[in-house]
């Protein structure tokens, strides 16, 4: 493992940590944090890989942004989460950016399920999904239903990114 990769990973995880704290406290991810992260990701990838690294960084940003944009477009995610995921992509080689996006989506689903479960609304939520399948249309959650309330998705992005970084640094590769 190269020193550049280690430093870049620590910086990425530090930025994600700040984003999680901000998301938990203010329900916002500051644009300046994302812009700083995008710049650092582009610079670190370019430094370690030259033009190829810059290309990887830009493609990683695009992949992560593209994975999360539909959720924002359909109202299932805030814009800050999409921008944060693009920032993550700027730090990672393309295939790890793809894995980070997929792991983050899985972590978001698990987090959402656990929130519904621990708040005692699993049967209510499953009932609404059953009705949606029957009606073949979307039924918005009731105002008292936790499934309709936002949660700090930056936590899921951190978990997904940690998973991808683990495979990149420790396990030595996944689909590389």
Image (tube, helix red, strand yellow):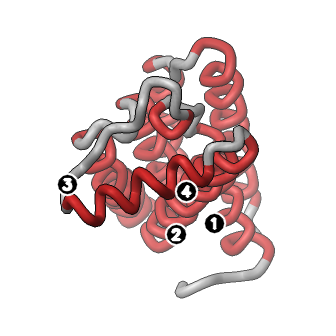
Question: Gap between marks 4 and 3, in whole Å?
Answer: 20 Å
Mark 4 residue crowding within 10 angstroms, few (<14) / some (14–19) / many (20+): some
Q: Residue furthest bottom?
A: 175
Between tags 2 and 3, which lies in front? 3
State which tag comes first along the sequence, 1 or 2: 2
Residue at the disc numbered 4: 109
Q: Secondary structure at mark 3?
A: loop
Q: Nearer the viewer, mark 4 or mark 3?
A: 3
Give the image quarter of residue 13: top right
Calculate the distance from the C-alpha at mark 2 to the C-alpha at mark 4.
Answer: 15 Å
Which residue is disc 3 drawn over? 137
Residue at (32% x, 38% y) in the render: 140
Q: Residue furthest right?
A: 170
Q: CA distance from mark 2 to mark 3?
A: 31 Å
Say whether marks 1 and 2 touch (CB < 8 Å).
yes
Q: Is residue 94 visible?
A: yes
Q: Which of the image's four quarters has the N terminus? A: bottom right
Decide which of tag 2 and tag 4 comes sooner along the chain.
Answer: 2
Compared with 62, 43 (above or below) is: above
The numbered disc on residue 99 is 2
Question: Splitting the image into 4 quarters, where does residue 24 fall?
Answer: top right
Label 1 sits on a secondary structure element that is: helix
Q: Which mark lies nearer to you, 2 or 4? A: 4
Q: Nearer the viewer, residue 76 or 37?
A: 76
- State the CA–CA distance, disc 1 to disc 2: 6 Å
Across and down, in percent, residue 62 comes to 30, 54
Residue 164: which disc?
Answer: 1
Crowding at mark 2 (Cα within 10 Å: few <14, some 14-19, many 20+): many
The residue at 64%/50% (across/down) is 111
């Amino acid at each position: 493992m190269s020193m550049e990769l280690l430093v870049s990973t620590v910086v990425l995880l530090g930025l994600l940590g700040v984003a999680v704290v901000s998301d938990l406290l203010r329900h916002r991810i500051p644009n300046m944090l994302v812009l700083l992260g995008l710049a650092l990701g582009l610079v670190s990838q370019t430094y370690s890989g030259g033009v190829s690294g810059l290309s990887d960084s830009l493609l990683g940003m695009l992949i992560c942004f593209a994975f999360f944009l539909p959720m924002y477009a359909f109202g299932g995610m805030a814009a800050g989460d999409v921008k944060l995921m693009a920032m993550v992509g700027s730090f990672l080689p393309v295939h790890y950016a793809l894995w980070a996006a997929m792991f983050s989506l899985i972590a978001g689903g698990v987090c959402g399920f656990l929130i519904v479960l621990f708040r005692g609304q699993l049967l209510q939520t499953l009932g609404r999904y059953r009705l949606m399948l029957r009606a073949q249309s979307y039924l918005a959650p009731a105002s008292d239903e936790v499934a309709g309330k936002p949660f700090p998705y930056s936590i899921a992005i951190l978990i997904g990114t940690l998973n991808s970084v683990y495979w990149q640094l420790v396990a030595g590769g996944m689909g590389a």
